[in-house]
Amino acid sequence: MNRLDETARGVFTIAVTPFLPDGTLDLASIDRMVDFYVEKGATGLTILGIMGEAGKLSAAESEAVIRHVVARTRLPVIVGVSAPGLAAIRYLAERSMEIGAVGVMVAPPWTLRTDAQILGYYRDVADTLGDIPFVLQDFPLVTNVVISAETVLKIVEDCPNCVMLKHEDWPGLDKIGALRAASDAGARRISILCGNGGQFLPEEMRRGADGAMTGFAYPEMMAGVVAAQDAGDAERAQDIFDAYLPVIRYESQPGLGLAVRKYILAKRGAIAHDTVRRPGKPLSAGTIRDLDFLMTRLERRLADLQS
Amino acid sequence: MNRLDETARGVFTIAVTPFLPDGTLDLASIDRMVDFYVEKGATGLTILGIMGEAGKLSAAESEAVIRHVVARTRLPVIVGVSAPGLAAIRYLAERSMEIGAVGVMVAPPWTLRTDAQILGYYRDVADTLGDIPFVLQDFPLVTNVVISAETVLKIVEDCPNCVMLKHEDWPGLDKIGALRAASDAGARRISILCGNGGQFLPEEMRRGADGAMTGFAYPEMMAGVVAAQDAGDAERAQDIFDAYLPVIRYESQPGLGLAVRKYILAKRGAIAHDTVRRPGKPLSAGTIRDLDFLMTRLERRLADLQS
Amino acid sequence: MNRLDETARGVFTIAVTPFLPDGTLDLASIDRMVDFYVEKGATGLTILGIMGEAGKLSAAESEAVIRHVVARTRLPVIVGVSAPGLAAIRYLAERSMEIGAVGVMVAPPWTLRTDAQILGYYRDVADTLGDIPFVLQDFPLVTNVVISAETVLKIVEDCPNCVMLKHEDWPGLDKIGALRAASDAGARRISILCGNGGQFLPEEMRRGADGAMTGFAYPEMMAGVVAAQDAGDAERAQDIFDAYLPVIRYESQPGLGLAVRKYILAKRGAIAHDTVRRPGKPLSAGTIRDLDFLMTRLERRLADLQS
Amino acid sequence: MNRLDETARGVFTIAVTPFLPDGTLDLASIDRMVDFYVEKGATGLTILGIMGEAGKLSAAESEAVIRHVVARTRLPVIVGVSAPGLAAIRYLAERSMEIGAVGVMVAPPWTLRTDAQILGYYRDVADTLGDIPFVLQDFPLVTNVVISAETVLKIVEDCPNCVMLKHEDWPGLDKIGALRAASDAGARRISILCGNGGQFLPEEMRRGADGAMTGFAYPEMMAGVVAAQDAGDAERAQDIFDAYLPVIRYESQPGLGLAVRKYILAKRGAIAHDTVRRPGKPLSAGTIRDLDFLMTRLERRLADLQS
C-alpha cells in the first residue's frame, strides 16, 4: 500500500514510543517493538499518536521515530500529525509522506464546539493536506470534541482525502450503525477502525467496523477477535475478548493507561524499558501488584481457552 | 442504623426509579425492586442519585419514592439531594430524614475548579446540613469536578458530618490508597464505597475500600466480590468479577448505561418496565441484540463457575 | 400583554432577588425594586434568572417572589424556570403562568454539545411546555453550551412556542445579523433581547436586536440607548452608553458581578441591603473603593452629558 | 536587560505577527510594527503568544519572527513557548535565548485541573528550563485552567526562575491584592503585568500591578495609564482609560479580537495588511462599520481630552 485508502481493514497497532531509563529515545527497542507487533498480527502501524507521546517529542525525535519504523517494516504506517495550527500539520504530513508513511491522522483541537466549527476545521485540514489521505480521530474523552454522526458524514462528503475514521467515541456503537446505514444508502464508505483500547471490539465489528486501531499490549487479542468475527464466529470472538477483558479494562484507565501498556510490553519483551516521559509518572506498587496478578490469571485463562 | 456513620460497609445498591410505559411513577415496581435488591445481597440502598433520574422527578414524586422505599425495607436508605443551591439541598435533606433516611449524598456543581472552591462548597454544605450525615460523591466523569485526595482529606477534616466517600474517580485506585494511608496515619477514617458500575471493585477492595455503592443490574456480583475479598480470597473475588465483566463494561457506557441497566432489571423481573424518562432514549435494536447475547453467555459462565 | 409573543420590544430588566442581612427574603425591597425598575424605564421584568439567584431559593421562596412581583406591577413578567429535568420545568412554568407571568425562560443544561443534542433538548422543552411561550437563553459563558445561528433557527422552526431569544453569546454581533438575515428571508421572526450586562447594546441594536434583557444597575442606560437607537440617533445612543461603560465593564465580571450590582442598587436606594446568598461572597474593600470611585465619576459625566 | 527578572515594569506589548494577503510572513511589516510599538511607549515586547498566532507558524517561521524582532530593537523581548510537551518547550526556549530573548512565557495545557496538577506542571517546566527565566501566563478564559492565588504563590516558592505573572484571570483584581499581600508579608515578589486587552488596567495598577502586557491596538493607552498611575494621578489614569474603553471592549471579544486588533493596526499604519491566518476569518461588513464608527469617535474624544 502506497497510500491509505477507504479499503483498509484489520489491525493497525498504535505504537508506543520506547525510551531509555534516562528518557532518551530507545531506537533499538523500536526495532524489537515493530517485529513484535508484526508477529502478533498487526496489518498496519500508527505512530506518534496520543499514546505515542507525540507531544513530548522534539521535531528531530519525531522524524527519527518515523524513519526507524518505516525502515523496519513493509506494513503501512500512519503518522499522527495533530498540532495547534495548519502550518505545523502540513509540515509534519509532508515530511511523513516523504519518509514513507501511507497517510496521517488528525484529532480536533479542544476548543471546537458546534457542528459547523468542526466541519470547518476539517475542511481546512483537508485543503491543507491536498492529496495526502488522512484519518479523522474521533475521541471525545480525550479531545473534548463531540462529533455527531451527521457531522462525520458531512466531513466525508466534503473532504475526499478523509479515508478513515478512528472511532473512539463512547458510547459509540449506534454511531457505527448510523455511519454504515448511511454508506449502505449511498454515502461514500470510508474505513472504520476502532480504538478505545479495544473495550468494545466484538460489538464494534458486529456493527460494521473494519477492524481495530488501538495499542492494547496484547495485539493478538485484536487480531484474534477480528479474524473470528470475519469468519462469522461471534462466540469465538467474544471468548477471546473476554479472556483479555480484565486487562483491557485495567489498561483503559485514562492518563494511567500508557504506563500500564508500557509495563506489560516491557514484561513481554517487546520493549526494553517501561519508561514514560514526564509528566507521566511511574506506576505505584499497588498498580504493579494488580497487573502481575491480572497477567498471571490471563495466562491461565488463555491456556484454558486453547485446551 | 438510624444515622449513617463512618463504619458503614458492604453493598449499598443505587436504586433505579421505575416508570410505567407512559412515564408515570411505577410504585408497585418499587416494592419488587427493593425486595430484589435485598434478596441479591444489598446491605443498604441509595435512592434519587444520578442513575435514579432524580433530576427528572417533581418534588412530589421524589417524596413518594422516598416514602415507598423506606416503608418497604429495614435496610438503611441514603437519599441523593444534590441541587443547584443550598436552600434546596437543606429542604430535601430535612424531608428525607423526617421520612426515615439515614443520610444524604451530595455531588458538587459542575462549575467548581480549584481546591479552595471545592473545599468551600463542601464547608457550606456541611454547615447547611447541620447534624445530618452526608456522603461526598466524587464522580468527575459526570460532574466535571476533579477532587484531589488532599482536598478530600481537608473536607473530612473540616466537616464532621461527612461520613462516607462515594468513590468513582477514574483512575482512582491510588487515591483510595492515599486516603487509607492518611487515615492509618491519624486522619479521621470515613467509609469508602465504590461506584463506577463496579468496574474496579476487586482492586478497590484490595486498596482498602469498604464495599460498593453502585447499581449494576446484578447486585449479587458486588455482594459476592465483597464477601470473597472480606474472606481474603482474591482469586475467588476476581473469578466472580470476571464472569460479570463483559456486562459490567457494557452497562458502564455513559448516558446509555441507565437504559441498559433498566433493560436487564426488567428482563430479570426486578421491575415491570425498562422505561427511561425523556430525554433518555430507548435502546436500539443493535444494543438489545448485544445485551441478549451477553446475558445468555453470562448465565453459561455462571453455571461453569459454580460447577 | 397576557402572553409573551414575538413582538416584544424594549427593556426587560433582569431583577435581582433582595435579601435581608440574615439571608431571608426581603419582600419589602421587592416592592421598592419593582417601582425603581419601572421608574427607570423598564417595559418588562424577568425574574428568577441566574442573576436572580433562582438556584438558591426554595420552591416556596420562588413562588413568593413571583407573587410579589406580579402583584406590584402591570408590566409583563417572565420567569426563569431552568431546572435539571423536564418535570421540574413543567411544574415551575405552570405555577408561574397561574400566578400571572406572561412566559418563561429556559437555559440549556451544561452537558449538551452537538447541534442535534441542543435541538433535541429544546424540542423536548417546547413539547413539555405546551402552549406556554418561552425564551431561549443563549449564554455560553455561563451555561457551557454553544448554540450556532443555524441551531437557533432550527429551534425557531420546530418550536412555535419559542418566541424570544435572550442573546448573550460573546462575540455575538454577527449572530444577530445572521438571524435577522434569515427572518428577512422568510424564517419566523422572533424577538431578540440582549443580555451580557449590556456590554454591546448599541452595536446589538444596530444589528437588529429589539432591545435589552439585562440587569445592569442603571436601567436608564438601557432605556436611553434603546430610545436613541429607535430614534435613529446612533451617536446619542453611543454617548449615553459610553458614559456608563466603565461601570458596565466592572459589573460584567463573572461571579463577582451580582454582588457589584446589588451594591449599586442598594446605594441607589432600589433595595435595602446588598446581601448575596451563599456561596456568594461580600465585596472586598478594594472592590468597594473601585465602585465608589466609578460611581462618583459617572455622576460627573452624566452631568456633562446633559449640559 | 539580558535576562528578565522580578523588577520588570511598564508596558510589554503583545506583538501580532503580520502576514501578507496570501498568508506568508510579512517581514517588512515586523520592522514597522516594532518601531510603532516603541514610539507608542512600549518598554518591552512579547512575541509568539496566543495573539501572535504562534500555533499557526511553522518552526522556521517562528524563528524568523524572533530574529527579526530582536534585530530591530534594544527593548527586552519575551517569547511565548507554550507547547504540548516539555521537549518542545525546552527546544523553543533555548533557541529563543540564543537568538537574544530575555525570557519566555508558558501557558498551562488545558487538561490541568487540581492545584497539585498545576503546581506539578510548572515544577516540570521550571526544571526543564533550568536557568531561563519564565513568565507564568494565567488566562483561564482561553486556557481552561483556573489557578488560585495560593497555587501561584506555591509556584513562585518552588520555581526560582518564575519571575513574572502575566495576569489575565477574570475577575482577577482581588487576586492581585492577595499576591501583593503575600509578598508584603515575605513571599518572593515577582513582577505582575496585566493582560486581558487592558480592560481593567487602572484598577489593576491600583491593586499593585507593575504594568501591562497586552496587545491593545493603541499601546499609548497602556503607557498613559501606567504613567499617570505611577504619578499617583488616578483620575487622569481613568480619564485616559475611559476614552479608549469603547474600543478596548470591542477588541476584547474572544476569537474575534485578533482580527479587530489587526484591522486597527493596519488602519493606523503599523502593519501593511490585516490578514489573519486560517482558521481566522476576515471581519464582517457590520464589524468594520462598528470599528470605523468607534475609531472616529475615539479621535474626537482624545482631542477633547487634550484640550
Image: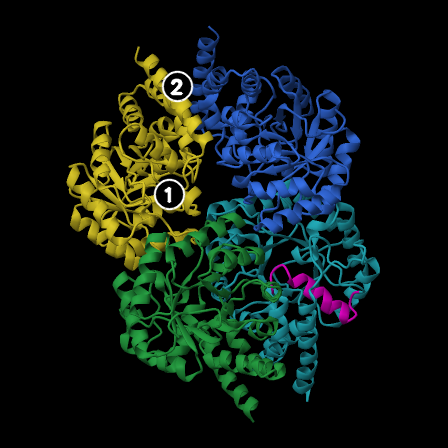
Chain colours: A blue, B yellow, C green, D cyan
Please identify, in this view, whether the residue under mark 2 or under mark 1 is nearer the observer. Answer: 2
Question: Do marks 2 and 1 share a subunit?
Answer: yes
The part of the image, by quadrant, that contains residue C102 is bottom left
Q: Is residue D165 magenta?
A: no
Q: Which residue range is magenta in the image?
A: D253-271
- Determine the chain carrying the residue at label 2: B
Q: Give the residue type that dot 2 points to.
A: Arg
Percent position of residue B53, x then y: 33, 45
Q: Give the residue type that dot 1 points to.
A: Asp
Task: Give me the residue at 49% from left, 65% from top.
Answer: C165
Density class for disc 1 (Cα within 10 Å; few <14, some 14-19, many ≥20) is many
Percent position of residue D256, x then y: 64, 61
Say what secondary structure mark 1 lies in.
Answer: strand
Task: Give me the residue at 23% from left, 47% from top.
Answer: B133
Percent position of residue D139, x then y: 56, 57
Say what secondary structure mark 2 lies in.
Answer: helix
The correct choice, above or below, for C72 with respect to D50 in the image is: below
Q: Which sits earlier in the primary sequence, circle 2 or circle 1? A: 1
Quadrant position of the C terminus of chain D in the picture: bottom right
Percent position of residue D205, x then y: 56, 71
Real-space CA distance between mark 2 and mark 1, rounded to the nearest whole angstrom: 33 Å
Residue C182 — which label?
none
Quadrant position of the N terminus of chain D in the picture: bottom right
Q: Which residue bears the numbered disc 2? A: B297
Q: Which residue bears the numbered disc 1? A: B138
